[in-house]
Structure formats: C-alpha cells, structure tokens
Image (cartoon, rainbow, N blue to C red):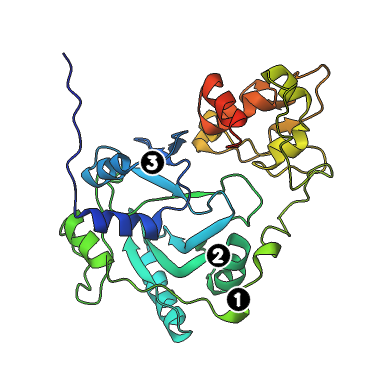
Amino acid sequence: MHTVAIPRMVGTLEQVRHYADLFVGRWSDFAIQTTNGGYVRAGRSLELEDLLKHFQGWRTLGTYLIDGQGMCRCCVYDDDRECGLLQLLQLQEVLRQHGHVSYLERSRRGGHLWVFFEELLPASQVRDWFLPFCPSGVEFYPKQSEGGAYGSLIRLPLGVHKKSGQCYPFFFDDDVYALWRGVEDQLHRLMSVQRNPVPASRKQPLASVGATPTQPHHPSLAPTALTHLTYSQNTIHAWCEMQDPFAVIGRYVQLDQRGMACCPFGDHHQGGRDRHPSFKVYQPKRVSGSSWFCYTWNRGGNVFDFLCHWYNVDAATMWRRIQAGEV
C-alpha cells in the first residue's frame, strides 16, 4: 500500500493566508516552474497544499497577477540585470517620495519590487497609476490590462528557484542585507507589510471596469453570454446549438474583430504562454460543431469542449455545472 507524503504546515495558518492575500492573483489556475526556469500551467485551482509544497521547495509556483475579473491586488517591478537591485532601490525611494510603500525581494538576477493595494483594482488602473514610475529596462507587471485571458505570470516569493536552487528573501528595515533566515521568518515579517490606499482620484466606477480592453472585442460579444437551459435543451448537443461561440468564449478570451486571440491553454505553448495569436473562434458549420481551434496545439472543439478545458473538468462535471447555472 502506497502512502502519500503530506507537506507539513510552514508558519501559521494565518500567516499562509496573509501571504496568499498579498501575492496570489488568480486562484482558478497557477503555473509550475520547470528545471530550466520556464513555467507550465497547472490547469487547476490553487490549493493550500500547493503553497506548502512551494514553501518547502517541493515545487515552485508562479501566479497570474490579474484575476478572473481583471482585478489586481498588487503590482511588481522586475529588474533582472546585474545592477537590478540598485535600480530597484532607487525606484523604491522615488515611490516613497510620492507616498507609496513598496517591498524589495531579491531574485536570481536583480530583484522584484512589490507594491500592495488596500483594495482590488482593475489592471488598467494599476498600469495607469504605477507604470509611469517604471524606469527604462525594468519590466512592469501586470503587463496587460483587463479584458484578456490570463496575462503574464511572475514567480511567487519564498520558493526555491529551480534554476539556481536558491531561495531569495525580502529586504526589511531591520535586515538591510536581506539574509535568508527561513520561510517562517519571512512569513512573520510579511505580516506587517503596509498596503497602499487608493486615492479617490484613482478609483473608477465598477461599471466601467473592463470597458476599454487593449484590443477590440468581436462585435457579437454580449454581457449575457450563456443562453440558459430550458426544458427542451436537456442535452449537450441542444445546449451547444443555442450558444453564440463568440459570446461564450469571449467571456474568457479577448477576441479581435477576426475572432483571433492568444490561446488561453498556455501549457501547450512554449514557455507556458501563447505569445502570438494562434487561437481562432468561428461559427460552426454544423449544429454544435467545432467553433474554435488552436493552430499551435492543432486542436479545437465546440463551446462545451472549451469550457471543459477552461475549468479542467470532465464532461459530466461540466454538464452538471451548466445545468445548475454555475457557469
């Protein structure tokens, strides 16, 4: 009989939850770092056990800063150059002079500078607010505005970088050398980080969130994308017949006027992300027939197949969710 090793608790449950609230963007999916430093999508929801494995070095995780509603709880400046730490220290001082608190984390090369918010903000607002501070040669996350699928990912702190085999700590005021004293010590220190309040001038009504995506949506997209079941639509075939593929898939993937987009199933693409649009949505030629296709993956299907892949569930589970109105 085989036994499964259960990772022990690292820090307190309150500390782990606080860590997750600071850093985890999208809970419905995450990425796993490979030995060469790249990432592959997990294709499932993030669990507490995943974070514990991350802290213990069993696996190293990446998070998508933009959640399923296009909102962010933080932003990050990333400088991988040899002078990266010095550049980010200077940027940290500039942000401080403007009243913004930030936290510097070492990385394999250079560092990451994290800025946390007191409330969730649309990705476009975050970029409008903090991207102007970004120096030349420094990457800024989120790289995209809301309206897309996943956006770019960044490594979650306090895990072992698979390429260097090292853990990298945060600089804190009483630890200017950023010495690694263990995950528990870092989790304890992170409990006292300050989040930046959002000025009234930076807030916008929720109704306008997502109103200006980075690319135009397909003209047939509508706010109420799914046509709900009636008694006569009690089969998957009948349900698919009632759906507009542009509207359904457009809830999850930002389509251009041609129905093209970057494929949301990044684990089938080099580096875990489709960098050039290879995903197309079109009207099916037959009832409930294929309505989307990824040219890189060389695979497609109907709207029901898309939802199964998106939520990473089998057909029976997906159908139960649709019947229950959970999608």
Residue with the mark numbered 2 = 121
| Nearer to the camera, 62 or 194 | 194
- At which x and y percent is residue 216? 78, 50
Q: What residue lies at 24% left-to-right and 48% top-to-bottom?
A: 166
Residue 294 seen in the figure: no
Report how far apart the C-alphas of labels 1 and 2 lie in the structure. Answer: 9 Å
- At which x and y percent is residue 177? 21, 69
Q: Tag 3: residue type?
A: Gly
| Secondary structure type for disc 2 | strand
| Image quadrant assignment for residue 232 | top right
Question: Is residue 189 placed above or below 39 in the rendered structure?
Answer: below
Q: Is residue 152 left or right of residue 183?
A: right
Circles 1, 2 touching at the beta carbon (< 8 Å): yes
Report how far apart the C-alphas of labels 3 and 2 lie in the structure. Answer: 29 Å
| The N terminus lies in quadrant | top left
Q: Is residue 150 left or right of residue 118?
A: right
Label 1: how many Cα within 10 Å (few below 14, some 14–19, many 20+): few
Say whether disc 3 or disc 1 marks the residue closer to the N-terminus.
Answer: 3
Question: Is residue 41 placed above or below 190 in the rendered structure?
Answer: above
Say whether disc 3 or disc 2 marks the residue closer to the N-terminus.
Answer: 3
Q: Tag 1: residue type?
A: Arg
Residue with the mark numbered 3 = 37
Report how far apart the C-alphas of labels 3 and 1 lie in the structure. Answer: 36 Å
Residue 202 - label: 1
